[in-house]
Structures are given as C-alpha cells and as structure tokens.
Image (spheres, rainbow, N blue to C red):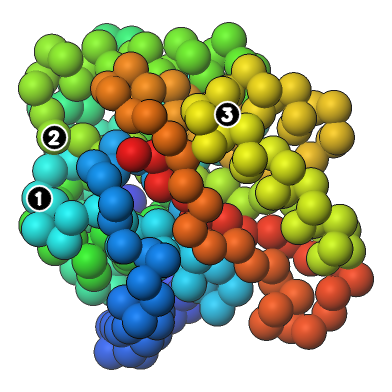
Amino acid sequence: MVLRRATFAGMFYPDNPAHLKQILDKFFKTVSENSESANLGKTFGIVSPHAGIAYSGLSSAFAYSTVDLNFSGTFLVIGPSHSGYPDSSTTLSWETPLGVVENDISFSKALSEYIPTDDFVHNQRENSIEVQMPFIKYRFPNAKATAILMGNQSLKNAKRVSDAIYNTVSVTKSDVIVVASSDFSHYIPKSQAEKYDKYAIDALKDLNTDEFYRRIHDEGISACGYGPITAMVEYCRKKGAKKGRLLHYSTSGDITKDFSQVVGYAAISVE
C-alpha cells in the first residue's frame, strides 16, 4: 500500500487524533440535533467544502451525515486542482490522524481506463481531496476511497468525467458515493457571497447543471470546484437522483467575525 501523507494535518485540521476526534464529535452532534439534516432519500453524492476544519468542518459534517452510517463502499472524491494539473485518478491510500483510508484499487484501476492515473500529482500539496479524508475515516471506518483531481473545469469536461465515473461503476458494480470538494465565493462581503452562492446552488435543486454553469459564469462566482460539483451531479442524475438539497450554508466570517471578505461554504446532498 502506497500512502499519501497527511501534509495538511496540523494546519487545516488537528494532527492529534484525540483533538481531531473531539472536534468531529462536536460537529456531528450538532448535526444530529438538527432535524433538517435528516436523509430524506437515498444519497448518491454530496458537496463538501475543503477549508480549515474550524471554518468549514460543520458544513462537511452536515454533508456526510446524509450518507448511511453503515456505508462501507467507496467514496469517490473529486477535487479541483488548485495548481492546474490535468485531470488524473490515483491508486494512493490516505494517511489521516485517525488511521488510513484505503484506496479501492480495483475501482481505481478500472477508472484509469477513462482518467489516467498520476500518483505523482496526487502526492503534491493539494488540500481539496486530503481534507475530506478525516471525515470519511471518522464516520465510515470500513469505507474505502479513490479520487479524481480536475484541472479542466469546463462543462464539457465535467460531463466527460461524470461519464467516466458512471461507466466505471457500471463495470465494477461498486457501491459508490461521489463527493464534490468545493468552497464557494472567495473574499467578498458576506451579504454578496450568500446572495451569489445561493443563486448558483438554487439551480442544483432540479440538477440543472447547464443553468448552474450559466449562473457561475454570468455572475463571476468564484466557487473553486464548480467542475467537480457538476461532474458529481451529472453522475447522480444518471443513477436516478431527482433533486439537490442545500443542508447548510456558512461563511468564514461566522468564525472570524470579519464579514468584509469571506469564503462561502455549502453542504449539499443529491438524492
């Protein structure tokens, strides 16, 4: 087993297992006390942010809470490549302070028929995928994972990635939940971030990715993972999903109390 080291432990989330577990315990307890978080149908995929756990961790907890607690299949995490590397898949497993999230090698090898494997790229300092792994290990200790880094976030390519996932799942018969890793608006006043982000997210209620893209581009919304979101939604639609549901929205300003320049975070389930 080849490991991707937890390079952001101690920065984006605690490197101390007990401290990390304490934080995650608190987040998921908060979610459990909120009746709106209940999973009203089968979850095919989720949107989960990837900022520091203090800022976006609660939103991530809302997203992962819609997945059956006994899920032991494979999480396919799609993250934007902030460094602009070409699309790639991976056979790496992930180190976390809570233990290793093992790669579903058979699924990853099948996926590589459509999206080339590049473990070198996945070993670089990229937070969009790594930050999801502590949540997966904590909540679903028996689950495996694999990942796609997207450098090309065009609508055409997002739909191509969704086809690749759908075809791989069809061939392998795997039980897969797709996680789109994305933050939303960056460094604008909270009032604007919430207005623009919810305007874009509203297009996902009926899984309309064409309209989602139009709103993102027309309004200049700086969501960093709109491609992964679209790939996830398109895959879920092919699998029978009927709707998207906004579970939680917050901004970095809710923590820092500086509302002049915030980053937006959303938890969305596709059911």
Name which quarter of the figure residue 69 lies in: bottom left
Amino acid at circle 3: Gly
Name which quarter of the figure residue 82 lies in: top right
Q: Which residue is mark 1?
A: 72
Q: Is residue 67 left or right of residue 23?
A: left
Position in image of residue 139 (x %, y %): 22, 66
Q: Quadrant of the C terminus?
A: top left
Position in image of residue 46 (x %, y %): 40, 45
- Badge 3 local density, few (<14 within 10 Å), some, or many (20+)? many
Q: Give the residue drawn at x 16%, y 15%.
A: 170
Q: CA distance from mark 3 to mark 2?
A: 23 Å
Give 58 or 77, whichever is nearer the viewer: 58
Position in image of residue 101 (x %, y %): 21, 55
Amino acid at circle 1: Ser
Give 212 or 140, whichever is nearer the viewer: 212
Q: Give the residue drawn at x 35%, y 81%.
A: 33
Looking at the rendered structure, the secondary structure element under dot 2 is loop
Q: Is residue 115 visible?
A: no
Q: Earlier in the sequence, mark 3 or mark 2?
A: 2
Q: Which residue is mark 2?
A: 175
68 relative to 2, above or below: below
Q: Is residue 254 left or right of residue 94?
A: right
Looking at the rendered structure, the secondary structure element under dot 1 is loop
Name which quarter of the figure residue 193 lies in: bottom right
